[in-house]
């Protein structure tokens, strides 16, 4: 079951329309129904409360304003640890040159780090 703090993808008519984070799930006064508060991850941010059965929170199709809707829990992709060969603790003397060397093949697939604080202002060539 999707739980508080989970990210869900909201589908309308089988098309993904928005991501949301589940802020709260509390029982409704109607038996077997829940009030689910969602932070819609879009601009502008908006909080909505829907009243749904547990099956709908778990991904079953339901109807809202005559349109079929569905929530799908988002599972973050697993990122392989890029530092598998790095020692868990730093070398005792802090100058172990072997631990600082890297495999050329692993460097080919690494991305660039961009510093937002030092990025260039393209309009006038000054740092911002």
Image (spheres, helix red, strand yellow):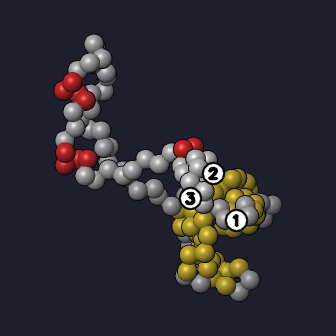
- Of mark 2 and mark 1, the one earlier in the sequence is 2
109 sits to left or right of 44:
left
Q: Which mark is residue 43?
A: 1
Q: Compare residues 9 and 69 and report the one nearer the observer.
A: 9
Residue at coordinates 70% horizontally, 65% vertically from top-left? 43
The quarter holding residue 99 reads top left
Tell me which numbered mark, 3 or 2, is placed earlier along the sequence: 2
Instruction: Name the residue at 51% across, 45% down.
Output: 115
Residue 7's x, y, as percent?
57, 58
Tell me: residue 104, above or below residue 55: above
Disc 3: CA contacts within 10 A as few (<14), some (14-19) or many (>=20): few
Residue found 55% across the figure and 82% down from its top: 14
User: Do tag 3 and tag 2 residues touch (Cβ < 8 Å)?
Assistant: no
Q: Residues within 10 Å of mark 1 (few under 14, many from 20)?
A: few
Mark whose residue sits in front, 1 or 3: 3
Dot 2 surroundings within 10 Å: few (below 14), some, or many (20 or more)? some
Q: Nearer the viewer, mark 3 or mark 2?
A: 3
* Quarter the N terminus occupies: bottom right
| Label placed on residue 13 | none
Which x, y percent locates residue 36? 71, 60
The residue carrying mark 2 is 4
Q: Secondary structure at mark 2?
A: loop
Question: Is label 2 or label 1 in front?
Answer: 1
């Amino acid at each position: 079951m999707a739980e508080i703090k989970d990210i869900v993808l909201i589908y309308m008519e089988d098309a993904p329309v928005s991501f949301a984070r589940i802020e709260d799930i509390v029982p409704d006064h109607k038996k077997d129904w829940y009030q689910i508060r969602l932070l819609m991850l879009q601009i502008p941010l908006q909080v909505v409360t829907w009243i749904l059965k547990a099956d709908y929170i778990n991904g079953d199709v339901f109807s809202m304003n005559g349109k079929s809707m569905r929530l799908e829990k988002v599972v973050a992709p697993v990122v392989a640890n890029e530092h598998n060969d790095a020692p868990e603790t730093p070398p005792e003397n802090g100058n172990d040159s072997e631990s600082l060397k890297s495999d050329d093949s692993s460097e080919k697939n690494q991305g660039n780090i961009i510093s937002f604080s030092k990025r260039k202002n393209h309009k006038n060539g000054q740092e911002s």
